[in-house]
Amino acid sequence: MIPLGDSEAARRLSPANTALFVTNLAIFGVELWGAGSIPLLRFALVPERISHVQWTHPVAASSALLTLLSSLFLHAGVLHIAGNMLYLLVFGPAVEEHLGHFRFIKFYLSAGIAAGLATVSMAPQSRIPVIGASGAIAGVLGGYFVLYPRGRIRTLLPGVFGLRPVQVPAIVYLLLWFAAQLYFGIASGSGDPHMGGVAWWSHVGGFLFGVAAVPLMTGRTGRRRRTRVRVSRRR
């Protein structure tokens, strides 16, 4: 299912989401035109580096841990970044509208870190580099699942005469998406973070982080708003 848009976002190019989109494209451009001059392996997430981090060597430990962030902005090819950015543009704006710009960026990066740690936990001995924004974007999908279960996702589905656009309830779309990630994650086993070139456990971990984190973040916002209302009534 290829998502084309949603029913909840007031605008498609929201500030923080667009900034993340542009940053990913810019870094991918550097990857393409600076091929060979950038040691990509240094910035990719390698599970073994994290699971065997040497805390007695602070510089080496910091370098390894920073790959949990740096790997989120690297992509393996045009199709890789195109797919990730499409999902970001479809699902990101509505989540940003609810969380706010700065909180959305914090949420996005935290989801990416959680997704990376999920990959490390499932394949701690792996030396295969893991790159891409999909773990962070999976967190955005998890947040969308919590915030807008009654939303509608415009998507392309195969029909008799080829692909055709249809409206799918967000809760159905995202449950099917998550079920697919979980299935392929289980099928890939725990010795290798990839199956078919995709880090499935990163998607699972990011999505579950989004589902868990958004209620906590929005709950705090709700309490602050109720406090303001009470104060204004007393006045």
Image (cartoon, grey):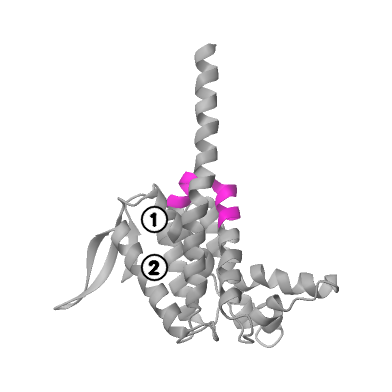
Which amino acid does the dot numbered 1 rest on? Phe
Split into 4 quadrants, where in the image is the N terminus?
bottom left
Split into 4 quadrants, where in the image is the C terminus?
top right
Q: Pick the residue in front: 186 or 11.
A: 186
The percent position of residue 190, horizontal first and vertical second, equals 53, 82
Position of residue 180 relative to residue 170, above or below, is below
Identity of the residue furthest to the top in this view:
235
Res 4 quadrant in image: bottom left
Circles 1 and 2, Cβ within 8 Å, touching? The answer is yes
Res 182 quadrant in image: bottom left
Is residue 153 something that shows in the picture? no
| Residue topped by disc 1 | 145
Residue at 43%, 79% (x, y): give it. 186
**Count of marks placed on residues:** 2
Range drawn in magenta: 94-107
Is residue 38 rendered to the left or right of residue 227?
Answer: right
Is 140 contained in the magenta span? no
Residue at 47%, 69% (x, y): give it. 204
Kindly report the secondary structure that dominates the magenta region of the rendered protein.
Answer: helix
Give the Cα separation between the discs numbered 1 and 2: 10 Å
Residue at 50%, 27% (x, y): give it. 226
Is residue 59 rendered to the left or right of residue 107?
Answer: right
The percent position of residue 96, horizontal first and vertical second, equals 49, 50
User: Label 1 neighbourhood size at 10 Å, few (<14), some (14-19), many (20+)?
Assistant: many
| Residue topped by disc 2 | 178
User: Considering only order in the chain, which callout, 2 or 1, is on the residue closer to the N terminus?
Assistant: 1
Is residue 188 rendered to the left or right of residue 40?
Answer: left
Q: Pick the residue in front: 73 or 26.
A: 73
Secondary structure at badge 1 equals helix
